[in-house]
Amino acid sequence: MDRHTHHKTLIAPLRAAQRVFSEAGVRAALQDLAPGALFRHSHPFGDLAGPEAFFDAA
């Protein structure tokens, strides 16, 4: 599998959850995809540690 197809496979559950947008589904998909992610945003958000912080702030 080429890397682009692999990356698409990794984010497929998140894309599916966003398509029907259930809050619980998107939160769970983000948690499964990148539980320790650090999201860097400009002011006023700043750095958001983890999917829960990202979802709550966005």
Image (spheres, rainbow, N blue to C red):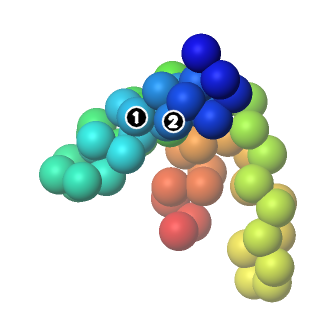
Numbered badge on residue 57: none
Q: Nearer the viewer, residue 12 or 1?
A: 1
How packed is label 2: few (under 14 Cα within 10 Å), some, or many (20 or more)? few
Q: Is residue 26 left or right of residue 42?
A: left
User: Closer to the observer: label 2 or label 1?
Assistant: 2
Q: Secondary structure at mark 2?
A: helix
Q: How many marks?
A: 2
Comparing 9 with 23, the one in front is 9
Q: Nearer the viewer, residue 58 or 8?
A: 8
Q: Is residue 35 visible?
A: no
Circle 1 SS class: helix
| Residue type, numbered disc 1 | Ala
Pointers 2 and 1 in contact (C-beta within 8 Å): yes
Residue shown at 59% from the left, 15% from the top: 1
Give me the residue at 74% from left, 38% from top: 37
Give the residue number, with chain letter if any, for mark 1.
Answer: 12
- Residue at left 37%, top 45%? 15
Q: x%, y% of residue 2? A: 65, 23
Label 2, label 1: how far apart the Cα atoms are? 6 Å
Residue 3 at x, y percent in the picture: 69, 27
Residue on which disc 2 sits? 8
Image check: 13 left or right of 6? left
Q: Residue at x 79, y 46 (%)?
A: 38
